[in-house]
Image (cartoon, rainbow, N blue to C red):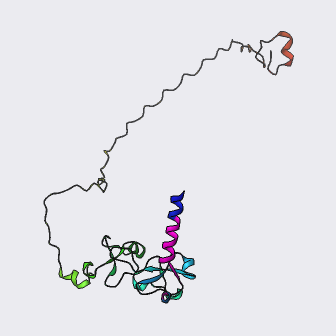
Amino acid sequence: MKLILGVICLTACLAAVNCKLCRTEDDCGDGFCCAGLTARQMENRGFCLRLNREGRRCNKPEAKVDFYGGKFLITCPCAEGLVCEPKGMRDGITDPDIIRRYLRCQKPGTTNPPVTGDDVKDKTTPEVVTTDEKEDKTLPPEIVETEAPKETPEPEPEPEPEPEPEEKPDEIPEEPEEGPGGEKPRDDDCEDWELPC
């Protein structure tokens, strides 16, 4: 517990010495800038932070917000003799938010000169002729249309006529074996039936 209280007291003392509050860039001395870590600090009071050394994250000097008294957002620019340029970023990235993440303080000689259109026109790429034919597996194979063989329709056999049932004039139609409810008919039930007995 004593160790935790000691660390808290040490942090508070260092913050009181190193973190001076500022409203404008004039409140901070030489070698410092006024930075706001949040939007509220940009509007009210920020902190006086040291200018960044080589290899540290930085803001370009143009990123100073004059509307809020010349404060920088989150980080300060580089110290004298250093420039704030992207370091370790792939070529072709133009998004300002991504570029801002890679900004580091560097010596002026270590940055690459910007590529202009004239430099690109002077350089030509040699033509490389290869005899290796590689199959492109990213595209589906071509679909070749073929004609189906012509079918000759076979004549359908004529259906044979069904034999007509022979009628016997002497026969009497059979009486139903079951009544309307499924029971066998009785002699006294015939009058209730819809069909003749």
Q: Is residue 106 left or right of residue 29?
A: left
Q: Return the residue nearer the eye: 185 or 112.
A: 112
- Is residue 19 on the magenta stretch? yes
Residue 110, how many percent across, how many down? 25, 78
Q: Nearer the viewer, residue 140 or 157?
A: 140
Write down the quadrant of residue 178 in the picture: top right
Question: Where 48 sits versus 176, above or below?
Answer: below
**Residue at image coords 36%, 73%:** 56
Residue 111 is situated, as x and y percent measured from the top left of the image, at: 27, 78
Q: Is residue 71 above or below residue 101?
A: below
The quarter of the image holding the N terminus is: bottom right
Relative to 101, is 122 on the left or the right? left
**Could you say where residue 20 lies in the image, as x and y percent from the top left?**
51, 80
Q: Relative to 193, is 10 above or below?
A: below
- Screen quadrant of the C terminus: top right
Based on the displayed image, in which of its 4 quarters is residue 52 positioned?
A: bottom left
Residue 78 picture location, percent across and down: 37, 81
Q: Residue at x 54, y 22 (%)?
A: 163
Magenta span has 157? no
50 and 12: which is toward the camera:
12
The vertical placement of 132 against 69, above or below, is above
Q: How many marks?
A: 0
Which stretch appears magenta? 8-25
The main secondary structure of the magenta stretch is helix
Q: Residue furthest front?
A: 2
